[in-house]
């Protein structure tokens, strides 16, 4: 029994230490990320604001076809993404070293402000079309910088709420984790107390238990579902309101900031 309890401790993401309100906040942040990513994708002419795997693949394609000038937006996106993550991480570490408990608000607040600037400036720069004309010019790079840096803040905030393995910029990874945890849960049902000590799934998932695998699957599956729902909403409302549609996720972020200020989220 002691051995089984020790194996359940490492790598915990959704356990009794992650109450329902934290899971709900994680899913809400996933919906915000999907909404913002969809609006950014439509506004920036199919430049991904959160998924650097897609931008990196396009970068490789352009370089492989000896068209480096077409790769400039992709290089810029990757660099801006790294910069946004770096700034958000630095800000969170600075806040924690000074005893600030609401470090989630410390990251979501700037993201909300950046999105306000993106929305207001973008509405002027893109006009009635709601998207840039091409991948050149100051308007495109300014909007790309605002959108991508805001995603960096959001990713760090989500990890603060739901643990290191939860992220919305790595949706493929969330689907993989969801599937692995679901398979692990099924094996737990099959094995019962006969769980082998050298289980492959225990090694790649860093231990766990049957109930923990079920909670992990719910968390990661929920992140994907809410991200998709946010992306659907972002696409739909962008067609109606153009960049002013971002008022919806901005309001959601503001609510999350207030919630964290009133009851600070403890790191998972």
Image (spheres, helix red, strand yellow):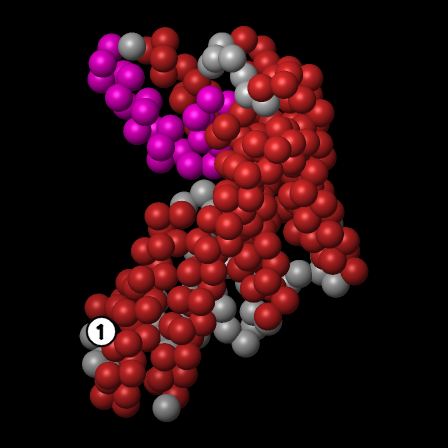
Q: Which residues are magenta?
A: 44-66
Left or right: residue 70 versus residue 22 is left
Q: Residue at x 56, y 72 (%)?
A: 17
- As displayed, is residue 158 above or below residue 219? above
Q: Residue at x 56, y 57 (%)?
A: 26
| Helix, strand or loop for disc 1 | loop
Q: Percent position (x, y) of residue 186?
A: 28, 76
Front-lying residue, 36 or 158? 36
Q: Percent position (x, y) of residue 205?
A: 33, 65
Asked where in the image residue 224 lies, by quadrant, the reply is bottom left
Q: Which residue is mark 1?
A: 199
Left or right: residue 231 versus residue 107 is left
Asked where in the image residue 56 lies, by quadrant, the reply is top left
Q: Residue at x 55, y 44 (%)?
A: 233
Front-lying residue, 103 or 224? 224
- As displayed, is residue 38 above or below residue 167? above
Residue 154 seen in the current view: yes
Q: Residue at x 25, y 77 (%)?
A: 187
Front-lying residue, 79 or 97? 79
Asked where in the image residue 146 lies, by quadrant, the reply is top right
């Amino acid at each position: 029994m002691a051995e089984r309890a020790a194996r359940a401790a490492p790598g915990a993401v959704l356990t009794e230490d992650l109450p329902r309100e934290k899971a709900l906040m994680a899913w809400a942040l996933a919906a915000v990320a999907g909404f913002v990513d969809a609006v950014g994708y439509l506004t920036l002419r199919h430049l991904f604001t959160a998924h650097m795997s897609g931008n990196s693949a396009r970068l490789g394609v352009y370089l492989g076809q000896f068209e480096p000038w077409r790769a400039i937006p992709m290089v810029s996106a990757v660099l801006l993404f790294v910069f946004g993550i770096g700034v958000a991480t630095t800000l969170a570490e600075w806040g924690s070293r000074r005893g600030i408990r609401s470090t989630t608000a410390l990251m979501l607040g700037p993201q909300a402000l950046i999105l306000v600037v993106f929305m207001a400036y973008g509405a002027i720069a893109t006009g009635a079309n709601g998207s840039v004309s091409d991948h050149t010019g100051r308007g495109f790079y300014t909007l790309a910088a605002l959108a991508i840096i805001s995603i960096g803040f959001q990713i760090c905030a989500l990890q603060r709420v739901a643990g290191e393995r939860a992220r919305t910029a790595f949706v493929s990874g969330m689907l993989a984790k969801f599937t692995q945890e679901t398979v692990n849960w099924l094996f737990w049902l099959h094995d019962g107390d006969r769980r082998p000590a050298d289980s492959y799934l225990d090694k790649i998932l860093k231990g766990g238990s049957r109930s923990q695998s079920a909670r992990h699957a719910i968390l990661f599956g929920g992140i994907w579902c809410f991200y998709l729902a946010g992306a659907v909403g972002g696409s739909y409302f962008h067609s109606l309101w153009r960049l002013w549609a971002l008022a919806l996720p901005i309001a959601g972020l503001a609510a999350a900031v207030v919630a964290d200020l009133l009851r600070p989220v403890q790191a998972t």
